[in-house]
Amino acid sequence: MKVLIVGDIVGRTGLDRLKAELALRKDIDFRIVNGENSASGRGIRRKEYNDILEYGADVVTMGNHMYYRKEMMAEYAKLKRLAIPANLTNIVGNKNVIVEKNGLKFGVINLIGKFAMGEMMEKNITNPFEVAIEQIEELNKENVDYIFVDFHAEATAEKIALGHYLKNRVNCVFGTHTHVQTSDETILDTGMAYITDVGMTGPKDSVLGLKKEIAIARFTTGEYYHYECSTNEAMFNAIEIEYDDKTKKAIKINRINS
Ligand SMILES: [Fe+2]
Ligand SMILES: [Fe+2]
């Protein structure tokens, strides 16, 4: 069984690159895409959600950008393939997503980190380690075959720790949010696949997808400048994992940065 996991899609150029890459990879059984920056870098709307599914994704995961689209607050729960961070207390949506496909049941959980995710949000984030266990129990009641966890977090130690904490309970823990791919992809001794950050599928010549001039102005002046998504050619950041069909253990993890 092969799974493709794609890092944060940024803007239209990121969506176009996603479309092209998914069209090239027909031998994949299950696809998870982080869509938190797909709407011009800021959040997701119905349009981008529908596009990502139409391109071939099975589940869309999110992150801290949930808050940017106020008009979406009442919509998230209606998007059945959208997993929102299960440990956010003030947003309504699916805390896990189950997809039945090719005779298998796939469960996906999205969690958000406690550290350095913005002061405004911190009071609304509960312990991701505890919530992970709660959500895994929910999925196990439904007899899922595979569980994937998108840990949307800034702090590398928090991400690595969650990976080890869940190594007997899920099939993959992957990090998102930093938009910079890490080269620590691995398979732990229990057969769980892990990477600290999948990276970004979005404008390469940018600062994490943001126009460089705006990012530099923010840092040099300390002032807030409105976000503008860079629009140049997108890079593609993803991981591909192959599992043994009998044991459900990962046998190969391949990092893609192109
Ligand atoms: Fe992001
Ligand atoms: Fe994020």
Image (spheres, rainbow, N blue to C red):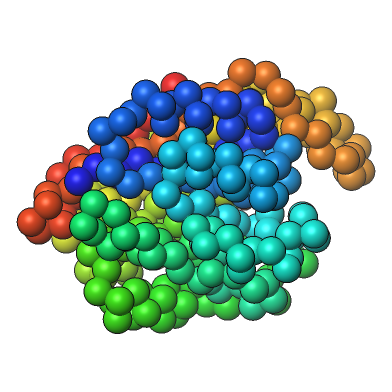
Residue 92 or 163: which is nearer the viewer? 92
Q: How many marks?
A: 0
Q: Nearer the viewer, residue 211 or 116?
A: 211
- Left or right: residue 194 compared with residue 155: left
Query: At 29% from the left edge and 81% from the top edge, which residue is drawn?
Result: 141
- Up/down of 221 relative to 59, above or below: above
Asked if 157 appears above or below 204 in the picture, the reply is below
Q: Which x, y percent locates residue 96?
A: 46, 68
Return the residue nearer the eye: 193 or 231: 231
Residue lying furthest top: 233
How far across and down, in percent of the image, does residue 81 sit? 49, 58
Q: Is residue 225 above or below residue 136?
A: above
Residue 12 visible in the picture: yes
Q: Residue 52: where, in percent of width, then height?
A: 54, 41
**Residue displayed at 21% across by 57% down:** 103
Work out which quarter of the rendered image holds the C terminus and state it. Answer: top left
Q: Percent from the top left, x then y, of residue 151?
A: 47, 58
Q: Quadrant of residue 254?
A: top left
| Residue 212 versus residue 92 in the image, above or below | above
* Quadrant housing residue 38: top right
